Amino acid sequence: MLNISNNPIKNFDFKSYKSGQLIFSISYFHQLNRFLFAIFLVFLVLLFLPWTQNIVGKGYVTTLQPDKRPQSIQSPIPGRIEAWFVREGDLVNKGDTLLKISEVKSDYFDPELLLRTAQQLKAKEKSVKAYAEKRTALEAQIIALELEMELKLSQAENKQQQILLYVENDSLKLEAAKTDRNIAEIRLNRVNSLSKQGLKATREVEEKQLNLRKIEAAFIGASNNFLNAKNEVQIASSEIKRLQASFQEKLAKVKSEKATAASLQYEAEGAVAKLKNTLANYKKRQALQYITAPQKGYINKALKGGLGETFKEGDKIVSIMPEDYQIAVETYIRPIDMPLLKVGESARVEFDGWPAIVFSGWPNASYGTYGAKVVAIENYISENDLYRVLLAPDLEDNPWPEQVRIGSGARTIALLSRVPVWYEIWRQLNGFPPQYYNMEETLKNNL
């Protein structure tokens, strides 16, 4: 009692009352001690039970193959929507036409663009053929000029050889005329000497003088013939050089024309190649006016609606979900847990909308979860500062539900080593990552 009254109660006997007898006669604290002791024993037993270390993460359902994931279809060229051939929810096959677009660039407005480009290509091809024929004709002309030059030079050289023979003959005649003149002079001198002595008549002296004049005339003629022959040799040599220069000039001109024709032919061939490329691009661009399905799947959503709406190249037009795919789960883990995961590790998955009772440390006691295997681990951190991990269904476990949709949420539990519960509590209190110490063999022996 607090003794706050002036009349305190002392030595009050509670047992004299029925309620006091009921309260003080029951030994309820004994049951409480037994209950606390039982809880302690259960807790002590639980501390030594095996616990599976795990890494919990959140993710969403995706597909295992990248080409089977939902995708958006873009147009590689800008355009305007002219007609839709599908509706949202339709199942389309690969190659089915989804919509038709038209050009918005003035460079491609001409409806006869392909025909006109083909005509330009044919004209350039004919130009190439014409230049090729011109080159062939010029090559034949070069051959003809070379043959003509060879023939003309051969004739000039033969004429030069003939003139050289004439020169040799005239030189012999000149020597003979010179000898005759010397003999005539000797005879004239002898007759003059004899005439002065009275041994020869004057008439003989005059005959010898006349004979000398004839011989001198013949000598002068032979000299002139010799000089003319030598001049003819010079003229023949000049003619050979003139012929060579003339034909070289003609050949150079024809070869220049041939080179020009070759240059124009190569230029035309380049234009042909460019026009072929342009024509192929136009054909491909015209084919791109019909946007087709890249694979079999369902039309999810038209991202560009209506008729006459324009878009830029690369803009998303419609999204499609492939029909045949294998689901997987994409989850994210903390960087501190990243080194502990390996490809092939087991995991459990809980899907949104599927009731589950989860015991993360006892996967065998979890209900409504499904087995999975780690198939890929990202090597670079994602934008959310976590690492991405891809989980595929465990073929040895229960199959994943077929009603799970791509994009729905999932909660994942990656299973690591088995340790006692007391070790896991100690690790969690210290903030250590799983497998902070390499105690696997020791813990196996203890278990």
Image: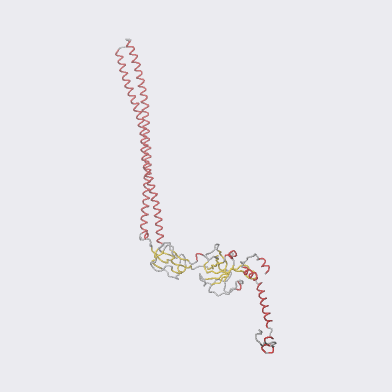
Split into 4 quadrants, where in the image is the N terminus?
bottom right
Total numbered badges shown on the rendered structure: 0
Decide: is 265 above or below 325.
above
Decide: is 249 above or below 81.
above
In this rendering, position of residue 29 left or right of residue 255? right
Q: Residue furthest bottom?
A: 17
Decide which of 392, 187 is in the foreground and name it: 392
Q: Coloring scheme of the render?
A: secondary structure
Q: Residue furthest front?
A: 6
Split into 4 quadrants, where in the image is the C terminus?
bottom right
Decide: is 168 above or below 68.
above
Residue 117: name its quadrant: bottom left
Q: Position of residue 24 (x, y in %)?
A: 68, 86
Q: Position of residue 352 (x, y in %)?
A: 53, 73
In this rendering, position of residue 382 left or right of residue 432? left
Q: Position of residue 320 (x, y in %)?
A: 46, 67
Q: Position of residue 240 (x, y in %)?
A: 37, 34
Residue 165: name its quadrant: top left
Decide which of 217, 234 is in the foreground and name it: 234
Decide which of 180, 397 is in the foreground and name it: 397
